[in-house]
Image: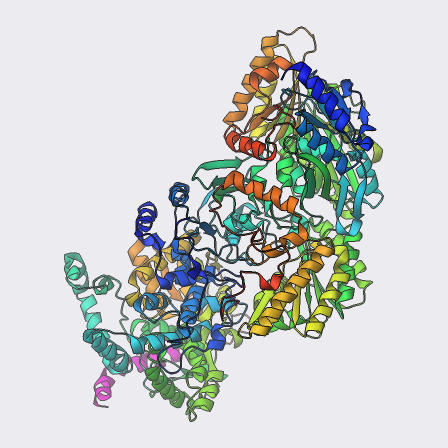
């Protein structure tokens, strides 16, 4: 139960209508885009940094957990109030405070939607480069928390490469700026340490973002291969040939099957894999690169290579890729999405192992990947109403992630560790590594009130806990993994 | 730690008692669970964009439906409020990669709501009168609206506004007075009449006249007919037709909606026509989904599918025809507002724009979020007046940004809403249908008297003839009125 | 601490070392001294375990440690409050893992930039990092300082290139974060604390870096102008254009004089390094040409191959080799659009005091290297203080920072070398006390 005096104090800060604790409200704040669910005790929607500072002071004194939430599109349970407490929904802080086209920066509040920023600055021939697949809905604050990537980060880098400064409120309610309007800032990179910290260190309340100049020309190629190995080999070959495309995306047969009816992108349904390659830049360079890429990709026996002729074609080719994951809803009621990263040179090896696992367990796995940078997105299909299927899906998830780490990769490329992968952290990092990270947490959040329990494995459970038995996914009953 | 944290109950548990919606034909579980809550729908949803609240988003509303189905929530007013807030623009469906049939889900949910809603007798009576009697009977409706016309014409309307006696009326109804739509000087009515093109007709179409549109958009409907006949299309307006039923299903009265559907199916299928057209996006959407509405009606299901196949939005039809490019210049900046029921449900986006681009001199400027709902949405203006106004304000802002003199659209709801917006904001923007501008351009052809160019089939005397026939149709009307009453 | 105790501790420390580490003991020289303070002993570990042992035992015997890379820029930072043990990493200079098609390389921190680039060059790749004196500068040292050179990746910073790091804590614990893949959100990015951390929280021992394919063709256009305005405006117009550029610098006559590049005539210099394939490079050259024409250039020339490499290396070395060493040097970071109007003020405040300003600017990045040369060698000392105050005032007005990179001790002491993190001082201190509770690493140099 919640202390009504605390509710009153929260209401005094943000206004009564922005403190929600009816059952019907809480039920809509118990999920994000991932499989976990847990209800916050109360949802608070602040409008300003000062309000957040006041809220933090209340929470800190009463020792109540605070979990920040953007649009709730995250895929690792980062915005889920697992231990209850206050869910800080930042959607009302959605103002673009300043656009400075000369310095190519924008100052924004955390609730600004990624794509809306790009739309707002497009009149200056600028855009915000990180483009997660959920960019139409996800917020900058969430992007910063998860250090989000997107297809084009192959060439342009992830969120951290595009954030110059942030205003944060720490667990004691203190407001500070880390970094600023300049490209460089002396001393420890506090800005950098916050980005990707999944809301466990501070709440980001403003951000100064670096904007990029729109490329002069964009060309998109679609290469269709009979099997995944050829497509994977083509990826490595393109990069070895000295070209870094803006994006290099791959989808396997199952993903194609799901996406095609949803978006009619024109992907052939009998293909084993399609490779989507985008080249951007100076018109002449794009022409030259496209010619070279075609040459390289042809060596791997493509069934067909297409070039998007119009902007509409291009949008369609991309729509297939961007909507592929969610379109999996057409194949199975649920999917469990893995976000492991591997060195691209291991693509053929790891992808064939994933296929083997799929066959061995007789569980369909659809693959959508940012192939250029080795960020895999295997989606394990299952029906959450079937307990056995669910259990197996999670077991396979753990196996695949271990495969990624064994190949020299990482547990998460862009979704974060959150709830779902924390028990696997010891597989990638030893105790010393993890201790060093936990020390950082104590610098910013001594009482462990900010997004408690995320990223780090539960100390009470042994490091050998298997992934499928992780506390986050057991005992949740039907309908919990949607 | 405070006890607020050690709340182990936060782990979601599902109570298996008291599961589900109370009445038959609830939203289907398998449709609900297609939603993987990815959140792609959020920014498409006008009420989410306005409030930033998950509860006012499609994903949130689906979560509430799941909550009820799973027995974690009862269908109380807290829950219903959020469903009520849904404007049913179905913009979310358009962006949903999982193919969640949201329109169908909310329609079925609203049907559950309307059956369970505890409403005052007065509201029940008003609803019954409005939905079951007035909207279904064009004669009563036109009589009523005719009275309103007199009210507006005589200056009473202004007087009442100025005297501010409206706050005496409870609820939203007072403020609604000011948003009363402008009523056409000339009504349109479905009398079984036929409009002939010059020469042998290329196609024959049936026109859905609708309930509100003939009363507020008489002149606009005539424009649309002129554009059709100008392009060799014969237009029949069956007398037996009625309201499409959209408003009924919007508020959850599916029984009446089905009645209306059956009536229209009979009216149009009995005619020898190539297509059934509507100038109202809401109506064509409803008619294109008669099959889903009547899927349990063994007698009508096949006929419903047959009709669905013939239904076209007028812009869609004209674009596919294709029309003769009009030659009269219209020097103006024009923007286009996508009606939800064209863009999201029928995926008709490019056709109206392409039609506009045919008009010489016309400069089409895109507005931001052209496909975000303007806040009209059937009875939404009444039931969610405040939200409706907020959405309208946003829409007016984006129209103003374009600097256009004319905003075009394809639905009477949008037309009324934006007209009200221009009045409220004193903007000098005209609200038009796409067909209005096509008609104006065709008319300007004559006035400008451009030298005849090759390939145009325009014939002055045919045009005159057409006009005469149209006029004769209207002139017949006053005499007809008494006869219709006798019916 | 009492000097005799310190001596005893040092002796005990040495005695306690394992034999293999004892073998790596060296005697201190000028090479290891920081602001004229020399360490008592120097160790050159050959493994991570060696570093770990050195640090663990230094903690035990309360010795203060300064990690040293190529010792090229030890002048950066405040004077150490205590300096007993120099830890040079030159022997840790191996490439640990490199697969060209992964666009990633993992190296030991002691590898020199030159050696690293050579290895990459063999596979037609490169690291978009430039630093002074590449034959000596080590990756670990470059990262600990954390500032970017004239070469930047997509106008970003050094930090953008690091994907993973292994560091050794003062208590000897070895920990890693990140990894070899470019996209990675698995735990905190601990490397961020060490890049620019000046070795105050731990010793960087291994680094994974993102590398890029070497462009097919490169050419640099070297242009001189009669006026600063012309030169700067020309460089801004090139910055704003969409042509492919790797480096873009404006260099003032004072700096150009010291750079002493024979082929370049005196004046205001704008240099841009272009890249591309055949058609695209030609397009870039043409476009630069037409942009330059609008700004009254005096001389325009193109350089390629080795000549090009040499010129850019000289620009990178500026201020750090013996020819160009200034009396005072500040590194200024600004919002890019304020750079133009500050350049003149920086020059005039120096010239009015009878000194010579040398300015080298990474255009568009907003970085200015501001060097003051005492040509006559007899300027009054207080003049330098006035310059520092003037510069900091000008920079603060424009929301930038001005760090003193080199200067006489009295200036460093009076003004403090760092600028811009006053507000974060509390957090910095808390980080320091968490990771180096005994304050044995580089005491006083950053905090």
* Residue C132 in view, yes or no: yes
Residue A239 vs residue B485, the one in the foreground: A239
Spot occupied by residue C248 in the image (x, y as percentages of width and height): 69, 34
**Residue range corresponding to the magenta coloring:** B462-487
Looking at the magenta stretch, what is its main secondary structure? Answer: helix
Asked which colour scheme the image uses, the reply is rainbow
Q: Residue at x 41, y 41 (%)?
A: A53
Residue B478 covered by magenta stretch: yes
Q: Is residue A319 visible?
A: no
Name the image quarter holding the C terminus of chain B: bottom left
Measured along the vertical axis of the image, is residue B143 above or below residue A59? below
Residue at 46% across / 57% down in the picture? B367
Q: Which quarter of the figure has residue A332?
A: bottom right
Using residue B127 as the reference point, say whether residue A274 is left or right of it. right
- Label count reads 0
Residue B398 versus residue C30 in the image, above or below? below
B49 inside magenta stretch: no
Residue B374 placement (x, y as % from top left): 38, 62
Q: In the depicted view, which residue is nearer to us: C7 or B25?
A: C7
Is A192 situated left or right of A291 in this image? left
x, y percentage for residue A108? 48, 44
Q: Indicate the quadrant where residue B428 lies.
A: bottom left
Q: Residue at x 80, y 36 (%)?
A: C93
**Image quarter of residue B405:** bottom left
Residue B23: x %, y % from top left: 35, 81
């Amino acid at each position: 139960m919640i202390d009504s005096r605390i509710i009153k104090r929260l209401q005094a800060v943000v206004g009564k209508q922005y403190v929600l604790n009816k059952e019907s409200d809480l039920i809509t704040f118990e999920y994000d885009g991932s499989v976990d669910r847990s209800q916050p005790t109360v949802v608070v929607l602040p409008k300003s940094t000062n309000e957040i500072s006041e809220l933090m002071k209340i929470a800190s004194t009463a020792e109540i957990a605070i979990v920040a939430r953007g649009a709730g599109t995250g895929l690792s349970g980062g915005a889920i109030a697992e231990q209850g407490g206050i869910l800080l929904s930042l959607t009302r802080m959605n103002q673009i405070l300043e656009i400075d086209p000369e310095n190519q920066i924008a100052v924004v509040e955390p609730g600004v939607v990624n794509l809306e920023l790009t739309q707002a600055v497009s009149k200056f021939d600028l855009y915000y480069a990180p483009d997660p697949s959920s960019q139409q809905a996800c917020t900058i604050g969430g992007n910063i928390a998860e250090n989000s990537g997107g297809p084009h980060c192959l060439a342009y880098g992830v969120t951290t490469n595009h954030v110059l400064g942030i205003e944060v409120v720490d667990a004691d309610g203190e407001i500070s700026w880390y970094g600023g309007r300049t490209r460089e800032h002396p001393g420890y990179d506090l800005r950098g340490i916050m980005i990707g910290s999944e809301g466990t260190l501070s709440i980001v309340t403003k951000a100064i973002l670096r904007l990029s100049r729109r490329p002069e020309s964009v060309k998109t190629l679609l290469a269709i291969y009979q099997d995944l190995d050829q497509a994977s080999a083509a990826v490595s070959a393109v990069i070895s040939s000295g070209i870094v495309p803006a994006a290099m995306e791959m989808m396997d047969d199952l993903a194609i099957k799901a996406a095609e009816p949803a978006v009619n992108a024109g992907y052939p349904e009998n293909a084993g894999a399609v490779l989507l390659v985008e080249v951007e830049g100076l018109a002449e360079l794009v022409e030259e690169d496209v010619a070279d890429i075609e040459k390289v990709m042809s060596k791997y026996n493509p069934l067909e290579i297409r070039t998007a002729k119009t902007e509409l074609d291009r949008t369609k080719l991309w729509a297939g890729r961007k909507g592929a994951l969610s379109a999996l809803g057409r194949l199975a009621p649920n999917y469990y999405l893995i976000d492991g990263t591997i060195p691209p040179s291991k693509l053929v090896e790891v992808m064939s192992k994933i296929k083997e696992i799929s066959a061995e367990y007789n569980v369909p796995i659809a693959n959508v990947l940012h192939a250029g940078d080795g960020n895999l997105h295997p989606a394990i299909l299952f029906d959450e109403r079937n307990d056995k299927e669910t259990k197996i899906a999670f077991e396979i998830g753990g196996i695949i992630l271990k495969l990624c780490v064994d190949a020299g990769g990482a547990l998460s490329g862009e979704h974060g560790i959150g709830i779902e992968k924390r028990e696997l952290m010891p597989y990638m990092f030893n105790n010393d590594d993890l201790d060093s990270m936990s020390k950082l947490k104590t610098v910013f959040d001594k009482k462990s009130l900010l997004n408690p329990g995320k990223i780090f494995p539960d100390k009470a459970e042994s490091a050998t806990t298997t992934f499928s038995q992780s506390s986050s996914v057991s005992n949740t009953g039907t309908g919990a993994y949607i | 730690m405070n006890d607020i944290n050690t709340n182990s109950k936060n782990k979601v548990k599902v109570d298996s008692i008291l599961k589900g919606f109370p009445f038959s034909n609830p939203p289907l579980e398998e449709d609900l669970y297609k939603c993987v809550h990815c959140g792609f729908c959020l920014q498409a949803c006008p009420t989410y964009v306005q409030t930033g609240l998950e509860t006012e988003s499609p994903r949130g509303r689906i979560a509430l439906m799941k909550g009820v189905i799973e027995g974690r929530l009862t269908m109380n007013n807290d829950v219903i409020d959020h469903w009520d807030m849904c404007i049913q623009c179905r913009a979310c469906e358009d962006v949903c990669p999982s193919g969640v049939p949201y329109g169908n889900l909310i329609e079925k949910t609203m049907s559950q709501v309307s059956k369970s809603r505890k409403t005052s007798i007065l509201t029940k009576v008003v609803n019954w009168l409005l939905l079951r009697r007035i909207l279904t009977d064009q004669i009563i409706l036109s009589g009523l609206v005719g009275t309103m016309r007199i009210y507006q014409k005589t200056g009473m309307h202004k007087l009442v506004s100025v005297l501010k006696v409206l706050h005496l009326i409870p609820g939203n109804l007072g403020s609604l007075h000011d948003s009363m739509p402008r009523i056409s000087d000339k009504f349109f009515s479905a009398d079984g009449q036929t409009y002939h093109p010059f020469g042998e007709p290329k196609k024959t179409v049936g026109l859905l006249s609708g309930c509100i549109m003939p009363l507020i958009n008489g002149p606009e409907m005539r424009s649309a007919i002129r554009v059709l006949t100008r392009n060799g299309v014969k237009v029949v307006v069956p007398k037996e037709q009625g309201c499409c039923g959209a408003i009924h299903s919007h508020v959850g009265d599916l029984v009446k909606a089905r009645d209306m559907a059956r009536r229209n199916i009979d009216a149009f299928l009995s005619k020898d026509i190539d297509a059934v057209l509507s100038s109202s996006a809401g109506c064509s959407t409803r008619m294109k989904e008669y099959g889903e509405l009547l899927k349990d009606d063994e007698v009508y299901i096949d006929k419903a599918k047959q009709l669905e196949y013939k239904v076209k939005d007028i812009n869609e039809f004209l674009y596919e025809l294709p029309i003769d490019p009009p030659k009269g210049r219209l020097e103006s900046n024009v923007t286009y507002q996508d009606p939800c029921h064209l863009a999201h449900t029928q995926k008709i986006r490019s056709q109206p724009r392409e039609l506009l681009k045919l008009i010489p001199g016309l400069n089409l400027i895109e507005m931001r979020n052209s496909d975000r709902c303007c806040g009209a949405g059937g009875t939404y203006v009444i039931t969610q007046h405040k939200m409706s106004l907020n959405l309208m304000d946003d829409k007016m802002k984006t129209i103003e940004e374009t600097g256009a003199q004319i905003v075009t659209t394809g639905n009477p709801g949008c037309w009324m809403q934006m007209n009200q917006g221009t009045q409220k904001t004193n903007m000098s923007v005209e609200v038009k249908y796409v067909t209005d501008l096509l008609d104006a351009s065709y008319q300007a052809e004559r006035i400008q008297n451009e030298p005849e160019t090759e390939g145009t089939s325009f014939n002055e005397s045919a045009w005159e003839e057409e006009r005469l026939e149209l006029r004769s149709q209207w002139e017949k009307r006053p005499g007809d009125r008494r006869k219709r009453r006798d019916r | 601490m009492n000097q005799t105790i310190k001596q005893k501790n040092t002796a005990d420390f040495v005695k306690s070392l394992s034999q293999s580490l004892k073998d790596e003991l060296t005697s201190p020289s000028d090479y290891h001294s920081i602001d004229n303070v020399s360490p008592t002993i120097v160790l050159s570990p050959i493994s991570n375990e060696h570093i770990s042992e050195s640090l663990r035992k230094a903690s035990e015997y309360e010795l203060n440690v300064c990690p040293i890379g190529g010792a090229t820029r030890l002048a950066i930072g405040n004077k150490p409050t205590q300096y007993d043990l120099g830890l040079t990493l030159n022997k840790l200079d191996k490439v640990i893992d490199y697969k060209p098609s992964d666009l990633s390389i993992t190296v030991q921190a002691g590898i020199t930039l030159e050696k690293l680039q050579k290895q990459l060059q063999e596979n037609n790749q490169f690291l978009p990092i430039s630093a002074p004196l590449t034959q000596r500068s080590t990756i670990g040292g470059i990262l600990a300082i954390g500032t970017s050179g004239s070469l930047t990746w997509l106008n970003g910073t050094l930090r953008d290139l690091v994907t993973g790091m292994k560091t050794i804590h003062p208590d000897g614990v070895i920990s890693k974060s990140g990894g070899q893949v470019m996209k990675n959100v698995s735990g905190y990015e601990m490397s961020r604390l060490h890049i620019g951390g000046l070795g105050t929280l731990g010793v960087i021992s291994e680094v994974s870096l993102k590398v890029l394919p070497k462009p097919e063709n490169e050419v640099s256009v070297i242009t001189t102008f009669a006026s600063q305005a012309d030169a700067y405006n020309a460089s801004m117009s090139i910055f704003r254009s969409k042509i492919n550029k790797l480096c873009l610098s404006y260099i003032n006559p004072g700096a150009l004089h010291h750079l002493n590049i024979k082929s370049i005539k005196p004046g205001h210099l704008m240099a841009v390094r272009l890249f591309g394939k055949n058609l695209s490079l030609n397009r870039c050259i043409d476009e630069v040409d037409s942009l330059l024409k609008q700004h009254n250039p005096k001389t325009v020339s193109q350089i390629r191959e080795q000549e090009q490499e040499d010129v850019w290396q000289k620009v990178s070395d500026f201020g750090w080799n013996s020819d160009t060493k200034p009396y005072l040097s500040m590194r200024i970071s600004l919002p890019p659009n304020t750079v133009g109007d500050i350049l003149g003020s920086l020059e005039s405040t120096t010239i009015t005091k009878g000194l010579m300003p040398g300015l080298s600017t990474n255009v568009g990045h907003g970085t200015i290297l501001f060097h003051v040369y005492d040509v006559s060698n007899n300027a009054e000392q207080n003049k330098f203080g006035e310059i520092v105050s003037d510069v900091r005032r000008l920079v603060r007005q424009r929301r930038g920072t001005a760090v003193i990179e080199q200067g006489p001790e009295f200036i460093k002491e009076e003004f403090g070398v760092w600028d811009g993190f006053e507000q974060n001082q509390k957090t910095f201190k808390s980080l320091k006390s968490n990771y180096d509770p005994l304050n044995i690493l580089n005491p006083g140099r950053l905090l």
